């Protein structure tokens, strides 16, 4: 019985054991099937996912191209910057580490709070920036002590270097962090957190050339995003250098002379090539501050500065040309055949149309005079007559031919056109017909007329050469290596203006008189080095109207007039007189002495620049003047 | 194999026992353990430290325990079954109490030399207790439901305790291997249906017991792409690792997923993933094949045994091993939720190794004492 029961139990167990074994085989089959599915059917998909996991493509920022002057002096380049980072996981006692760092490189309370906040919100293996923009000294102090600074490391990057700082800031411009609006292109570089792009000047205009193309580095990363090793690397293309026609020595001189006068602008042009040798707007700013990132307070200070350092006055500043406009008026009349160099007008000190009276700057007048004296002594009444005879539209057309009131297409952003009025223009904008009196004001560069210093430069360059000289910042031929590189003749692209050369000669002779003849308004600023003499024209631009009371009681002394109300002083010039090679235009804001001729501050700047330019000229090398001669400029 | 001894004899000599040890099984176990040690060497990026060396030592110690257990008379094991079960249950309660008093969940007891996880030991102890219980019950008695109360408690008691630890994997294994034992013992199929139905109706209650992270694992299992960087991360990364291994694998020490830390717990629960990544489908099939051979060996021993206790015990232990392997591999392949069951003889861990090897010792004891007659109450004659 028991035997039988045991048999039954045994066979039941066997049956069930076999059933169970079958179940197990089925389950195992499922596992094997799944393994096959994962590793054979879907293997490709998972291999891609595994690679996506481990391979990360990092963008390598190419070094930004440099901006060089004509001799290869770097106006903008890159310098290494050092950044201390802390990996919280690798630093046992964060506070102790921060204290230790603080002893080597001072950390402000704000910085420390930021570091602690970053540590709180980030993963422990993500590096937190302790200090940015460290110099070599600070970097070395950290680096030497890394053994005691657990988790602290120094990372190297590149930051834009502007060795001449505010001396050439408006031309070079600056780079700054990428903002939302800049993200329109598809260059992935723009999304790099530390990337900087050109925001002004050449940096902006040639940003694409300077930027270069991104390289890539394929790295293997672990699950925490830490780089394990580099798998492949494709170096990008470094940005191209941009070579300017500037001569940093001349630029430096111009900047010194201009900044001494406060708010001013100046341009120096090589007439043969059109290359701008110096382009200065003062005061400047420190472009490095933008690259590093400006604080709100620093930005406010720049924006609210009455001298307007952020504005490039050479291309964006518009000024009434004042008497510097007179040669242009003369040219319009000569070309139209309305006057000859010998046409005489009488200057009794004032000019009357109907009941409007226009005064000459010289009380009592110049008497009877012709073109040469009129330019030399800047007689207002003479040009009232010429302008009246000529009419505004002829003057405007001529002004445009000389680059005034037109877009010259300079490479840097911010260029303004100024204004050369015409009868149509006035009617279209004001609805009032052009008045004869309007032309009279324009005849001496007042009234509606306004121009930029760049345009003044083009105007005097064309006046000096009779050709359509076009001022340019970028030097197409690259760095000037040898004397052979230097221009030996006028750029044939600059077409002749098609104006009778005798007219030019008459006006140039008047301008020679301005500086080199005793009664000339710029006589005090003449160049005494034989063969280097300059010709020029002074100008004063009225900032406010002269009241009747002042007319009656005499003008206030210059020191009594608030700076903002003082007249602008202007000067245009070229040299050497016989065979012009360089041209210069200077505007000193509120530098006018009085309603009288304001060449007093502007002309000496032009003199110094033109003299220095000639003395540096590699082709027309003229021996240095003996010491003690006024007007000599010390070479730097 | 020589059957020179008389199987009516109650006692066997030690020499006879040694001759009858299952050397083939030992070879299989050694092969699996060797693979495990190699994987641990790889898991440490090609180093014996901190896992491979310790695991090798543990395997040696566990092998000694296995041989010891094999040489002990099967009837002694039968007699000790309830006592052993009670001792392990006490340890389990002790862990639970200390876990409640102390901070957080601690699953092990530190004996100084070795840390013991009572829940692991319980897997073997429960098999022993059930084998003894069902050995004592006749076929007719099995049909009576009240006879099933005690064995049900033997399983569910520790299962609930383990679930509270919380260790879903061990609880699952206890319940499943318990069910297998019930099935083998001859419980009526309709009763089974009843229990399954009751079990299903208890699911909401069990759900209540689950911790949030366990619930998340189940949600994740149901919808793995739902949160690839959160709860689904482990499962997804494991699948990526296995799948990217392909047919022939990435090569020893070359697994990118495991060595770059995308794979969690690569030395314990997810070690099969690493093997499949580095050695591919071929490596995975070889290992599964070895396990299949071991299971087949267990079945062979069970069928050779002439006593009910031995057969039940052998099948219970074999089923236990199978469940370890199935749950672990199915889990890393995303077939079932991540429940935390180690891969026997491969995963790093002392207690699991000890438990598994002890179980194989019992299996060998069943083989050695296959012809011994064991009565319903452990006596040699009916």
Image: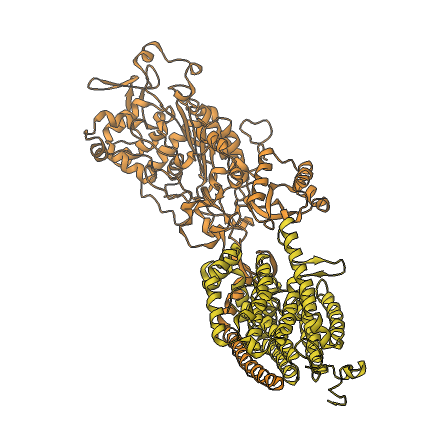
Q: Residue at x 68, y 77 (%)?
A: B363
> Quadrant location of residue A418?
top left
Residue B108 lies left or right of residue A292; in this view the side is right
Q: Nearer the viewer, residue A613 or A546?
A: A546
Residue A600 lies left or right of residue B173; in this view the side is left
Q: Nearer the viewer, residue A79 or A438?
A: A79
B307 shown above or below B101: below
Counting the numbered discs, the total is 0
Percent across and percent down for residue A33 are 51, 77
Residue A631 lies left or right of residue A410; in this view the side is right
A546 shown above or below A445: above
Q: Is residue A529 visible?
A: no
Looking at the colours in the rendered structure, which chain would you say is drawn in yellow? B
Q: Is residue A226 visible?
A: yes
Percent across and percent down for residue A502 are 34, 37
The quarter of the picture where the C terminus of chain A appears is top right
The quarter of the picture where the N terminus of chain A appears is bottom right
| In the image, farthest residue toward the top | A553
Q: Nearer the viewer, residue A16 or A513?
A: A16
Percent across and percent down for residue B264 are 59, 61
Snapshot colouring:
by chain
Looking at the colours in the rendered structure, which chain would you say is drawn in orange? A
Percent across and percent down for residue A126 are 58, 50
Q: Nearer the viewer, residue A386 or A561?
A: A561
Q: Residue at x 75, y 68 (%)?
A: B57
> Quadrant location of residue A108?
top right
Residue B40 lies left or right of residue A341; in this view the side is right
């Amino acid at each position: 019985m028991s035997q039988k029961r045991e048999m039954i139990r045994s066979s039941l167990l066997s049956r069930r054991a076999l059933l169970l074994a079958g179940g197990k085989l089925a389950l195992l089959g499922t596992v094997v099937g799944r393994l096959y599915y994962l590793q054979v059917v879907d293997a490709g998909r998972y291999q891609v996912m595994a690679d996506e996991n481990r391979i990360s493509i990092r963008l390598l920022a190419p070094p930004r191209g440099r901006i060089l002057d004509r001799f290869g002096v770097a106006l903008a380049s890159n310098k290494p910057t050092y950044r201390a980072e802390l990996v919280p996981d690798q630093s046992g006692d964060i506070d102790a580490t921060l204290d230790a760092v603080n002893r080597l490189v001072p950390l402000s309370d704000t910085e420390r709070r930021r570091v602690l906040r970053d540590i709180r919100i980030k993963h422990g293996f993500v590096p937190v920036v302790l200090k940015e923009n460290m110099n070599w000294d600070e970097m070395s102090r950290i680096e030497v002590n890394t053994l005691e600074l657990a988790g602290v490391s120094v990372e190297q990057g590149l930051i834009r270097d502007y060795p001449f700082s505010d001396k050439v800031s408006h031309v070079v411009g600056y780079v700054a962090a990428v903002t939302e609006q800049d993200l329109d292109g598809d260059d992935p570089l723009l999304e790099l957190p530390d990337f900087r792009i050109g925001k002004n000047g050449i940096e902006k205009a040639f940003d694409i050339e300077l930027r270069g193309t991104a390289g890539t580095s394929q790295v293997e990363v672990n699950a925490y995003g830490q780089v394990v090793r580099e798998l492949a690397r494709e170096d990008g293309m470094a940005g191209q250098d941009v070579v300017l026609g500037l001569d940093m020595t001349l630029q430096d001189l111009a900047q010194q002379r201009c900044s001494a006068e406060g708010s001013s602008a100046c341009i120096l042009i090589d007439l043969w090539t059109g290359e701008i040798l110096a382009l200065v707007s003062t005061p400047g700013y420190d472009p490095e501050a933008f690259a590093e990132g400006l604080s709100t307070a620093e930005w406010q200070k720049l924006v609210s500065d009455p001298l307007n350092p952020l504005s490039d006055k050479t291309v964006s500043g518009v000024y009434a040309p004042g008497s510097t406009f007179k040669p242009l008026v003369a040219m319009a009349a000569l070309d139209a055949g309305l006057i000859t160099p010998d046409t005489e007008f009488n200057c009794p000190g004032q000019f009357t149309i109907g009941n409007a009276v226009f005064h000459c700057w010289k009380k009592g007048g110049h008497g009877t005079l012709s073109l040469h004296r009129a330019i030399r002594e800047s007689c207002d009444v003479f040009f009232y007559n010429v302008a009246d005879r000529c009419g505004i539209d002829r003057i405007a057309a001529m002004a445009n031919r000389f680059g005034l009131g037109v877009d010259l297409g300079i490479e840097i952003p911010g260029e303004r056109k100024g204004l050369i009025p015409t009868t149509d223009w006035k009617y279209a904008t004001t609805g009032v017909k052009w008045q004869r009196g309007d032309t009279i004001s324009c005849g001496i560069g007042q009234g509606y007329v306004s121009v930029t210093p760049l345009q003044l430069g083009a105007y005097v360059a064309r006046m000096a050469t009779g050709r359509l000289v076009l001022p340019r910042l970028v030097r197409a031929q690259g760095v000037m290596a040898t004397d052979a590189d230097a221009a030996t003749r006028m750029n044939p692209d600059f077409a002749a203006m098609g104006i009778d050369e005798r007219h030019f000669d008459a006006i140039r002779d008047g301008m020679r008189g301005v500086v080199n003849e005793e009664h000339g308004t710029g006589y005090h600023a003449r160049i005494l080095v034989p063969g280097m003499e300059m010709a020029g024209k002074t100008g004063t631009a009225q900032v406010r109207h002269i009241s009747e009371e002042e007319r009656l009681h005499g003008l206030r002394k210059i020191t009594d007039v608030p700076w903002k109300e003082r007249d602008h002083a202007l000067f245009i010039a070229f040299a050497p007189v016989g065979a012009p090679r360089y041209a210069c235009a200077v505007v000193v804001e509120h530098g006018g002495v009085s309603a009288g001729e304001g060449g007093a501050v502007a002309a000496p700047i032009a003199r110094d620049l033109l003299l220095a330019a000639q003395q540096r000229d590699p082709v027309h090398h003229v021996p240095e003047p003996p010491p003690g001669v006024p007007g000599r400029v010390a070479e730097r | 194999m020589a059957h020179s001894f008389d199987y009516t004899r109650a006692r066997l000599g030690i020499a006879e026992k040694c001759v009858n040890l299952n050397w083939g099984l030992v070879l299989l176990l050694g092969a699996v353990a060797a693979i495990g040690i190699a994987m641990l060497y790889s898991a440490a990026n090609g180093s014996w430290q901190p896992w491979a060396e310790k695991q090798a030592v543990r395997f040696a110690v566990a092998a000694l325990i296995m041989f010891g257990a094999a040489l002990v008379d099967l009837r002694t094991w039968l007699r000790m079954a309830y006592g052993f079960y009670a001792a392990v249950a006490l340890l389990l309660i002790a862990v639970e109490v200390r876990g409640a008093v102390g901070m957080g969940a601690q699953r092990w007891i530190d004996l100084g030399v070795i840390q013991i996880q009572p829940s692991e030991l319980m897997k073997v102890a429960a098999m022993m207790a059930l084998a003894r219980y069902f050995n004592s019950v006749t076929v007719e008695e099995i049909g009576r439901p009240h006879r099933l109360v005690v064995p049900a408690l033997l399983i569910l008691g520790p299962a609930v305790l383990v679930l509270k630890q919380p260790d879903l994997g061990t609880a699952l294994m206890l319940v499943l291997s318990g069910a297998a034992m019930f099935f083998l013992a001859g419980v009526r199929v309709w009763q089974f249906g009843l229990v399954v139905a009751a079990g299903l109706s208890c699911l909401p209650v069990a759900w209540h017991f689950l911790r949030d992270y366990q619930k998340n694992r189940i949600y994740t299992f149901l919808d793995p792409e739902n949160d690839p960087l959160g709860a689904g991360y482990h499962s997804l990364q494991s699948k990526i690792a296995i799948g990217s291994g392909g047919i022939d694998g990435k090569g020893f020490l070359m697994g990118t997923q495991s060595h770059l830390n995308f794979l969690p717990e690569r030395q314990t629960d997810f070690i099969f993933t690493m093997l499949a990544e580095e050695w591919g489908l071929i490596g995975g099939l070889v290992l599964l094949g070895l396990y299949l051979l071991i299971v087949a060996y267990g079945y062979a021993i069970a069928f050779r045994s002439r006593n009910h206790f031995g057969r039940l015990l052998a099948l219970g232990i074999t089923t236990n091993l199978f469940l370890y392997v199935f749950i672990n591999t199915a889990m890393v392949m995303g077939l079932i939720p991540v429940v935390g069951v180690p891969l026997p003889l491969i995963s790093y861990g002392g207690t699991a190794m000890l438990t598994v090897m002890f179980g194989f010792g019992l299996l060998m004891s069943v083989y050695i004492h296959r012809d011994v007659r064991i009565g319903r109450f452990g006596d040699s004659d009916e």
